[in-house]
Image (tube, helix red, strand yellow):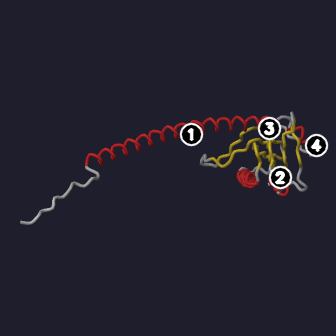
Amino acid sequence: MGKTKTRKPQKGLVFDDVWAMFQETDRIVKETARRQEETDRQMKETDRKISKLGSRIGQLIEHFAASNITEKFRTFGYHFTQISRNHSIEDEQGQFLAEIDLLLENGDCAMVVEVKSLLTRTDVKEHKKRLETFRTYSDKRNDKRRFAGAMAAALINKDARIYALENGMYIVEQTGDTVRIEAPEKPLFW
């Protein structure tokens, strides 16, 4: 008779081991998801607080820019009799077109002022579009006043300053408890 070989059981993973690993992985995935949800919640709260702070900073900069701005523009021959903040314009269907941070007005001319904490070249480009929108809006209402543009900011990027001035806009800059206005060589009107 021949010899039969008996097989030794292989050492390896058995169902219970695999099931335990699956359960541990599932627990880790669920814990990671819970932590991610908490992180997302905290980030949303932080974003909300930063947005609120940014809004307050914007209001503060608008306040500083508005203080004695009409007197400062008198040195350039503008005699504004009215100033309004956060002036919105809508089309005939009530759709929002643009918002103007500061609007200085008299019977013949209006100064459309955009206020930023840090002025960039992109801000100047957007304000040019805003001025064009305001001109189109005003033409539809038979408002023939001339509109000049100004950029006001607490901090001004050098490139943005040059770009704004080259595009005929005034620069309104906070200097202590007052504002300083820099005029372009050739002011443009929309």
Other residues around mark 1 within 10 Å, as few (<14) / some (14–19) / many (≥20):
few
Q: Amino acid at mark 2?
A: Lys
> Residue 174: x and y, percent?
84, 39
Residue marked by disc 2: 158
Q: Which residue is mark 3?
A: 83
Measuring 89% from the left and 50% from the top, which residue is drawn there?
183
Q: Secondary structure at mark 3?
A: strand
**Marker disc for residue 75:** 4
Q: Residue at x 84, y 37 (%)?
A: 81
Residue type at numbered disc 3? Ile
Q: CA distance from mark 2 to mark 1?
A: 33 Å
Image label count: 4
Q: Please name the amino acid that badge 1 sits on.
A: Met
Of callouts 4 and 2, the N-terminal one: 4
Which quadrant of the rendered structure holds the C terminus?
A: bottom right
Q: CA distance from mark 2 to mark 3?
A: 28 Å
**Label 2: which secondary element:** helix
How far, Cα to Cα, is label 4 from label 2? 24 Å
Measured in 3D between alpha carbons, the distance from the residue under mark 4 to the one under mark 3, in whole angstroms, is 17 Å
In the picture, the quarter occupied by the N terminus is: bottom left
Q: Earlier in the sequence, mark 3 or mark 1?
A: 1
- Foreground residue among 91 and 64: 64
Write down the residue under mark 1.
43
Q: What whole-number distance in Å separates the C-alpha atoms at marks 1 and 4?
A: 48 Å
Work out whether mark 1 precedes mark 4 in sequence or the reverse, and give the earlier one: 1
Q: Secondary structure at mark 4?
A: loop
Q: Earlier in the sequence, mark 4 or mark 3?
A: 4
